[in-house]
Image: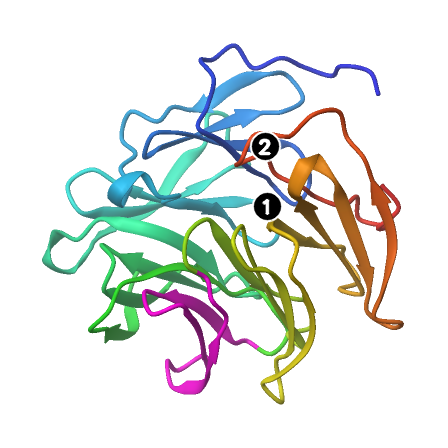
Amino acid sequence: GSRLATCSTSEPDEIREFSADGKFLLLRHGGKMSVWNAVEGRCVLTNDASESFRRFNGAAFSPDGRKLGRGEAGGRFAIYDLAADPPAREREWALPESFMVGTVAWSADGGRVALVLNNRTLLVCDAATGATHWRRDFDLQIWNVTWNNARDWLLLQTGDEHVLVLDAQGRDVRKLLALTEGSSTALFSPDGGRLVTACLGIGTRWFDAGLGQQRLTDETAAWHLHFDASGTQLGTFLDEGRLLWVEWSASSVLAEQATPGSPPLYQRLSFSPDGRW
């Protein structure tokens, strides 16, 4: 519980995520993303070149935490090597039609990146070369692409309150009515077997991703979902600052933890690797 470091910066709009090794922290100020050394509390990659569509999270760490992919000004995307100090730009490439990056997701093997461009196009590129694997344009708004699961499926939230499950080639697997309007999150478990959505107005819904069947619903307002490393426990914030854990093997609530007051709307929740904390 002791303080390790302090990042001397103005209050970020979101503390986005830690890298897998815990060494780096990704912060968002407006639509600009910066990387900080979490051990020393110093900025190692400024947000000067960063640019995200409509203040979305246009950057993400690779699954092994060794690289960062980020949308940048002028309709470009760049990948940085975090092993160098300061991080070195390994490669960059121009995006089609000078689009801006909305959200970023990496495949589990770290070999591909999925980019939501503006809010209508999903582009999957080779992380080593920048070559386009495939592109898909949509007639409705899309956002919050997630990947990094053993099934190699992508999850995309859509403007008609659904989540769309795609395979690694961009083909539809299924479309689920998840009522994701407003402040919401959706993600897969690490094994790709479970799909979970949460929304302030609707609550949390658990689906069997393979069958597309809804398994459990909690109507309490909730947001910011996070699986532990095993994928068997799910944590989420409920209203009034309460935390909820769900154990998949028993489909039951493990514990509720009261926290003082109501947390900020965009506060994040994460598990330690062993799922204990």
Name the residue located 82 percent from the left edge and 16 percent from the top edge: 2
Name the quarter where the C terminus is drawn: top right
Q: Which numbered dot is residue 19? A: none
C-beta proximity under 8 Å, tags 2 and 1: yes
Name the quarter where the N terminus is drawn: top right
Most distant residue in the left direction: 97
Badge 1, how many Cα within 10 Å: few under 14, some, many 20+? some
Name the residue located 17 percent from the left edge and 53 percent from the top edge: 99
Badge 2, how many Cα within 10 Å: few under 14, some, many 20+? many
Q: Which residues are magenta?
A: 152-180
| Label located before the other in sequence (2 or 1) | 2
Q: Nearer the viewer, residue 175 or 260?
A: 260
Name the residue located 84 percent from the left edge and 46 percent from the top edge: 256
Question: How far is the residue under mark 2 from the one under mark 1?
Answer: 8 Å
Confirm whether the magenta stretch covers residue 2: no
Q: Is residue 11 above or below residue 198?
A: above
- Amino acid carrying label 2: it is Phe
Instruction: Report which residue position mark 1 lands on.
Output: 65
Can residue 69 be seen here? The reply is no
- Amino acid carrying label 1: it is Gly
Q: Secondary structure at mark 2?
A: strand
Residue 254 in the image: state x and y as whole percent.
Answer: 89, 56
Q: Quadrant of residue 41?
A: top right
Q: Nearer the viewer, residue 81 or 39?
A: 39
Instruction: Report which residue position mark 2 lands on.
Output: 24
